[in-house]
Structures are given as C-alpha cells and as structure tokens.
Amino acid sequence: MGSEKSQHIMVLGLGNILFSDEGFGIRVVENLQESYEFPENVSLVDGGVLGLNLLGVISQADYLIVVDAIRNKGSVGDLYRLEGTAIPERIRAKNSLHQVDFLEALTLCQALDKVPETVILGVEPADIDTISLELTRTVREKVDAVTDMVLAELKRLGAVAK
C-alpha cells in the first residue's frame, strides 16, 4: 500500500493476422489474454499494424516485451530473445512494414527520453506472404513456448500471472 507506483510492463503483440505467420505476435497475446490473469501493472496490447501510433502506447511502458515473427536467418520455428543492440539490426533484417514503424516509434521514444527497457521474443516464420488467418503448423506449435517465454520475462520483472 505504499505510494510508489508500480513499474508499467507492457506485452505488445505485433503483426498482421491476415498474412499467416505474420500474425504470430497477435496470436500469442490472444493466448495470454484467454489463459491468464495479470497484475494491474501489466498490460497486454494487440499492436497489430498501429505503425507510428505505437509511439503513444509504448512510451507509457517502463518495460516492453514485444512478441513477433522474426526473420533471423534461422530454421522455421526457431525461437528468439533479442535485447539491447541486437534489436535494430534484427528488425531491419525483417523488412516488414510494421517492423519499420515499430523501430521508428522506439527511436522517437529515445528522442523523448522515454525508452522502455525492451525485449523482443519471437519465432522464425515459415510464411508471412500468403493471405491466411491460420499460422503454419510449425509456427502454431510455438505459440505455447513463446507464451511461456513471456511469462518467464514477467516473472523476472516481478509480475506473476495466474
């Protein structure tokens, strides 16, 4: 009951559910929303393709856990945890419109001197070009694993889901 405010932790799913594995981050956030309850200082956000509108959202966070499909020259289904200097390099490697917008929003946060501590969790996609609401089988099978990775990050930050 102290007067100090809890650190705001945001779990942000990025992607576009219309393009198969591109919707991975959104599907993980949906899984978290359906399966768990979170402390008040944790917010789950479907970032979809908000673009620079993400700036207003992510600048509110002290800690940002981003979930997305990440092309990292690995094998389909490989899991990733990126932080620090690895983030911009890997985002540029993806060449996806929403990723560029996310990078710009994060860069603008730096200009505003309000950069959340950021970790990006993701999976190597099989297909981000085909119009389909379904994830490919290999990537779909990774939703629970990345959900667990998000829960582990939250626990590390002192926010335990129920």
Image (cartoon, rainbow, N blue to C red):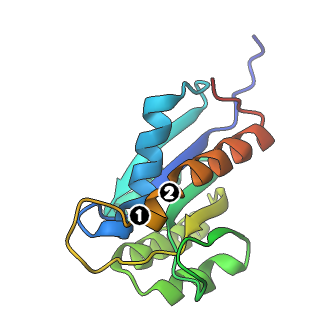
92 left or right of 155 in image: left
Q: Amino acid at mark 1?
A: Arg
Determine the residue positioned at 29% across, 60% down. Answer: 134
Residue 102 shows which numbered tag?
none
In which quadrant will I find the N terminus? top right
Determine the residue positioned at 71% across, 32% down. Answer: 159
Q: Which residue is denoted by mark 1 in the rendering? A: 137
Q: What SS does tag 2 mark?
A: loop
Q: Amino acid at mark 2?
A: Glu
Determine the residue positioned at 38% across, 68% down. Answer: 21
Q: CA distance from mark 2 to mark 1?
A: 6 Å
Residue 77: image x %, image y %? 55, 71
Q: Where is 137 relative to 27, above or below?
A: below
Res 62 visible? no
Residue 146: image x %, image y %? 59, 54
Q: Residue furthest front?
A: 137
Tell which of 106 and 123 is nearer to you: 123
Q: Which residue is denoted by mark 2 in the rendering? A: 141
134 left or right of 43 in image: left
> Would you say the residues marked 2 and 1 are in contact, meaning their CB atoms lie under 8 Å apart?
yes
Determine the residue positioned at 51% across, 87% down. Answer: 92
133 left or right of 118 in image: left
Residue 115: image x %, image y %? 63, 61
Res 69 visible? yes
Q: What SS does tag 1 mark?
A: helix
